[in-house]
Amino acid sequence: MILGIEKSVVLNGDPLDLSIRRIILSLISSHLFLVYFLTTTMIIPQGATVVLAATSFTTPLHSPTPPCFPYSATATRMSNSNANGPPSHGRRIALAAGIFGGIFGGGDEWTWNNGSDYYANADSGIHVLNAGKGPTNEALKKVNGMSQRRLGGSDIVVSELGLGTQRWVSKDFNAPNKEDVFSFMDYAILDNGVNLIDTAEQYPIPSDGKTAKEGDCEVVIGEWMTARGLQKGEGRKKVVIASKITGGRNVTPKNIKKDCAGSLQRLGTDYLDVYQLHWPARYSPQSNWGQSLAYNIDADKSPYWRGMGGPTSFEELCLAMQELIDEGKIRGWGMCNDNAYGLTACTRTAKALGVTPPCSIQGDFSLIDRKSEENGVAEAASPYNENVGFMSYNALAGGMLTGKYMDFPAALDNLDRAKITEAMENPRGRMDEFGWGRTLYRYRSEAAQVAIADYAKVAKDAGISLTELSLRWCRQRSLITTNLVGHSNMDQLKQSVDYFTRTEPLSDKIMWEIDRIHMRNRLPIFSSNHVGKEWYGEGEIGETIP
């Protein structure tokens, strides 16, 4: 490790007052031992060169910051076989430089150097090595009018619209069948610039274990890729496949490897582009379908989570994912239904171990669910921080943001017996089914329905549908890399493709009206007017609340 420090101390190009220089030089002197300690205990990667230049100074730990530093094949990874000394972590973060950043401050832009593996700040002279391929959400190309963006700091490029597959070939009353989904993939991927398909080993949902079995979605996608010559070779590069391992205590190093092999077999391909945890390996209040938001320590210490040695650690998770990358089984990995703690713990643990950080986090996001912008996820995922892409799902809030339940309420909410019967006999969607309608109740909370009516008025005033407003708004959010949208029929898919290939964004006026509604009714799906006095800490589906 070489640490070059220019000895002249200059602020904004002018010599400092002698007393100020003495203070700064004293601070530098007092920190030299700590710098030596950090550099000799592998906080800075072996072989890296960090130059602390004599002007306004910016570091990876001080704003503005460069994106995260995905694994480089040249880095030394943690090894338990290092018998001659402590393990070599190969961390990507120059923490030693952070000491001096705290002294000198900073605040200029970082520049990505195309063709090189670092971000640089021209004024400070700092080159941060191993900074990955570029900033997340960077628009790299258009294919048939569809923009495609970088996912995290990886070289994985995804379309702004992705195909959500949860209901494909499922037992839902209006689930698309095999012929339908073949048509969806032909239209979207072969003709309209979509390249991302999001699936999971649990899909389809709902399944019955007979005519619709878990894993059938992957099977159908694999059959389509084989039929179109896209399962291997150059053809395979035309499709980005993201799949998921079942979360919770199922996530172990052994199961990560086994379940990934199962997904690859069903898909009939050699690798996944992105492999995600369907929900966290640990307890997390936001990973369920109810209205739980607050962390509950009693839930965390339950035998389910703390028995048998507790949940898989972040270290075990990161090393298991790196093993799949080393074997060529996956290109990148990520999380789903997680939060800012999980995201940052994964990225920081991976960097400490010298392995590949996650490139994605997937989460519920819509006009009535903006929590990921305001609970730390957007800040953590930013290209200036952890540089992780965001895959949004449920942009239409279980169908509520299409407006189809506005004329009369969903079956579960209706007090008119005749209307209930009509809805059950001719369901408009999942909200008219007692099973799904109850599970997805948060999208129909009183506050949510007030917000939906307000957003519908904005759409009407703009001369567009509520569906269009909802999808185009999601597309314009700075957090979002790609939007995963499910479709029941081809007409819906064609509408989505149309909305995601519009060249004109929603106007500032429309975006501001949406924000004004949001400020009046900030997180409506986690609000309820009818929590029972006798429920004692449980929500409508038995989840822990608040």
Image (cartoon, rainbow, N blue to C red):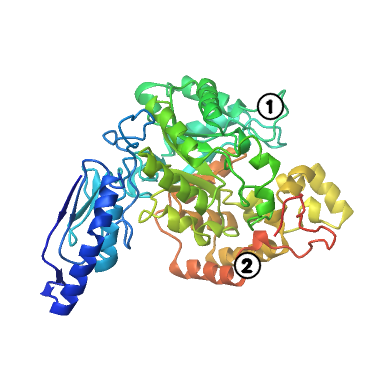
Left or right: residue 234 versus residue 475 is left
User: Residue 212 has which mark?
Assistant: 1
| Residue 477 visible | no
The residue nearer to you, when weighing 380 against 54, is 54
Q: Which residue is mark 2?
A: 454
User: Looking at the image, which residue is at 65% across and 63% down?
Assistant: 524
Farthest-out residue, right? 417
Residue type beneath disc 2: Asp
Relative horizontal placement of residue 465, taking residue 411 as reference (left or right): left
The secondary element bearing badge 2 is classed as: helix
Tell me: 297 left or right of 314: right
Q: Residues within 10 Å of mark 1 (few under 14, many from 20)?
A: some
Q: Position of residue 496 (x, y in %)?
A: 52, 46
Q: Considering only order in the chain, which callout, 1 or 2, is on the residue closer to the N terminus?
A: 1
> In percent of the image, x 46 and y 62: which residue is there?
506
Determine which quarter of the picture holds residue 214: top right
Q: Which mark is residue 461?
A: none
Give the CA distance from mark 2 to mark 1: 39 Å
Pinpoint residue 284: horizontal percent, then vertical percent: 61, 49
Amino acid type, residue under disc 1 in the picture:
Ala
Give how far across and how far down residue 435 sits, in percent: 77, 43
In this view, the mark in front (2 or 1): 1
